[in-house]
Image (tube, rainbow, N blue to C red):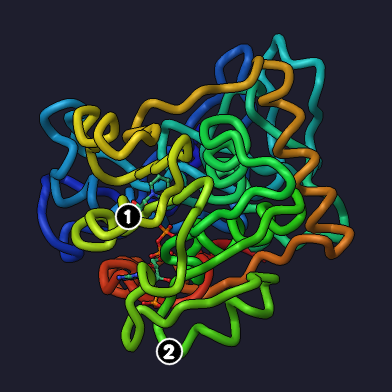
Amino acid sequence: MSIPMMKAVQVQQYGGPEQLKLVQIPRPKPLAEEVLVRIYTAGVLPYDWKYRQGQFKNFRPANFPYIPGSSFAGMIEEVGSDVTEFRNGQAVFGRSEKGTYAEYTTAPVKGLSLKPVKLTFDEAVTIPGSALPAWLTLFHTGGLMAGHKVLIHAAAGGFGMLAVQFAKWKGAHVIGTCSTNNVDFVYALGADTVIDYTSEKFEQKASDVDLVIDTVGGQTLERSWSVVKQGGTLLSIVEELSQEKAKKHKIHVIKPGLHSMPSPEKLQEIPQQIAQMMAEGQIKSVINKKFLLHEVQQAHKLSQTGHGRGRIVLHIAD
Ligand SMILES: NC(=O)c1ccc[n+]([C@@H]2O[C@H](COP(=O)([O-])OP(=O)(O)OC[C@H]3O[C@@H](n4cnc5c(N)ncnc54)[C@H](OP(=O)(O)O)[C@@H]3O)[C@@H](O)[C@H]2O)c1
């Protein structure tokens, strides 16, 4: 009997986008508590090209060859022997550590969510990789509450566009930064004030902020210290922050990786809640550009520019 095969993108060694190679490999088999998913859409995250470049090799070395990507939306095609919560033919979304730039992946049922009928696969794939981290960053780590003033840098990006909408939904006053092309877009997401970082200094327009969410780092992070009010929080998901400096400014700082997590039950519920909010049109997820699996190098090149609006996805099946 012949082994079922699939198309997948593989990386054999660290390097540039040319390391992303389309190959034919055997389709994975689900373990007892896993499902086999036919992937319709995979999310392309900045993490994927940073990992490919070897930026995390000191603390998370790659096991070559590997399949990039972590978020997927698709249909269950097989369930493991111990799986009772899901069945074949259900539309789902979630994360897989086995890689998602492929026609199939396997994933544990923990962390798997049902896709509402009204939600497209492209919208659903933005939940595990962007919406869920944005939600956890704002509400669980950042402690954002109604009435707070929040400054969200890179408000037009895959992470920022969702953070802006969640913060607004919570009842916060939202300030977002982006380039000229994206100003109208960020206002349409619900921001109260949008600052064009190419022509204005955000620290001249924003002050007494309860929470800053930084996804840019460098000078943007450095200049953010002065806008946080005493007792407020500066949170970066990309760069380390000095505790000494925080004491001097009388603010709290939260550095990458120091995220507080809800209970496992809650963590299972949140993606489903976000999916419902998207299906009802309360929250929009915008796709920057769709690429086919064989166009993966172009997808990474676009993501590496660090500019754009919404999430880049790989469209793998209909
Ligand atoms: N996605 C996640 O869940 C997640 C989780 C942890 C960490 N991160 C990290 O957070 C960063 C952003 O992720 P992403 O997924 O949102 O990336 P993305 O979709 O590539 O978006 C990047 C955004 O950054 C904006 N930008 C660039 N320079 C800026 C500046 N000086 N000031 C304000 N905005 C600026 C761009 O807006 P313009 O086009 O208007 O310039 C663009 O919209 C990445 O480094 C990523 O690794 C993301």
Q: Is residue 125 visible?
A: yes
Q: Is residue 108 left or right of residue 253?
A: right
**Is 88 above or below relative to 297?**
above
Residue drawn at (18%, 35%), measured in percent from left and top? 64
In this rendered view, identify the residue nearer to me: 206 or 138.
206
First in residue order: circle 2 vs circle 1: 2
CB atoms at circles 2 and 1 under 8 Å apart?
no
Q: Is residue 104 left or right of residue 275?
A: left
Location of mark 1 (residue): 226
Q: Tell me the number on the disc at residue 180.
A: 2
Badge 2: residue crowd in 10 Å (few <14, some 14–19, many ≥20): some
**Is 274 above or below relative to 182?**
above
Disc 2: residue Cβ within 8 A of ligand 1's nearest atom: yes
Residue 307 found in image quarter: bottom left
Q: Is residue 6 visible?
A: no
Residue drawn at (38%, 71%), measured in percent from left and top? 202
Image quadrant in which the C terminus is located? bottom right
Q: For the residue marked with disc 1, what is the amino acid?
A: Ser
Q: For the residue marked with disc 2, what is the amino acid?
A: Thr
Assign a secondary structure to mark 1: helix
